[in-house]
Image: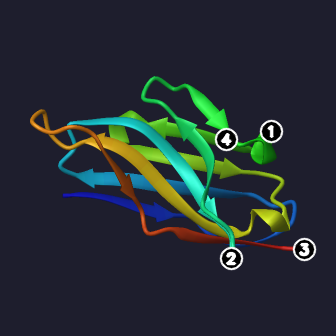
Amino acid sequence: QVQLVESGGGLVQAGGSLRLSCVASGNIFRINDMGWYRQAPGQQRELVAVISSGGRKNYVDSVKGRFTISRDNAKNTVYLSMNSLKPEDTAVYYCNANIRPSVDFGSVDYWGKGTLVTVSS
């Protein structure tokens, strides 16, 4: 069984910063891409940032220059550093990871339960 657990959400004023963390645990043979999605009230979930196992990064245009995704492969952890936060960044942020649980199985997408980020104006 694989679990993803996020932490680091909270309430922050516009212009402030937060750092989200997500740790993968359980039966893990290999972790491929890791990423962060977000879902604001009444909106669809959207990809915020993704990082490959080799460190290649991609961001949605609205966060480029403000958010930075990183990962520590030794700790099975992905981070999202968020600076210059705006009220429109308010959402539940979900961690996603494409994980191969064992050599006998293919890769599967796993999700965390989400962490709420609220940016006040």
Residue 14, percent from left and from top? 86, 66
Of the residues shown, which amino acid type is indicated by label 1? Gly
In front of the other: 61 or 84? 61
Q: CA distance from mark 4 to mark 3?
A: 22 Å
Q: Residues within 10 Å of mark 2 (few under 14, many from 20)?
A: few
Tell which residue pokes out farthest to the left in this image. Answer: 104
Q: Earlier in the sequence, mark 3 or mark 2?
A: 2
Residue that mark 4 sits on = 68
Of the residues shown, which amino acid type is indicated by label 3? Ser
Residue that mark 1 sits on = 65
Q: Quadrant of residue 60?
A: top right
In front of the other: 74 or 107? 107
Of the residues shown, which amino acid type is indicated by label 2? Pro
Q: Judging from the image, what secondary structure is the residue with disc 1 in?
A: loop
Of the residues shown, which amino acid type is indicated by label 4? Thr
Q: CA distance from mark 3 to mark 2?
A: 17 Å
Residue 53, percent from left and from top? 42, 29
Q: How is the image coloured?
A: rainbow
Tell which residue pokes out farthest to the right in this image. Answer: 121
Tell me whether circle 4 and circle 2 mark residues in contact (CB < 8 Å). no
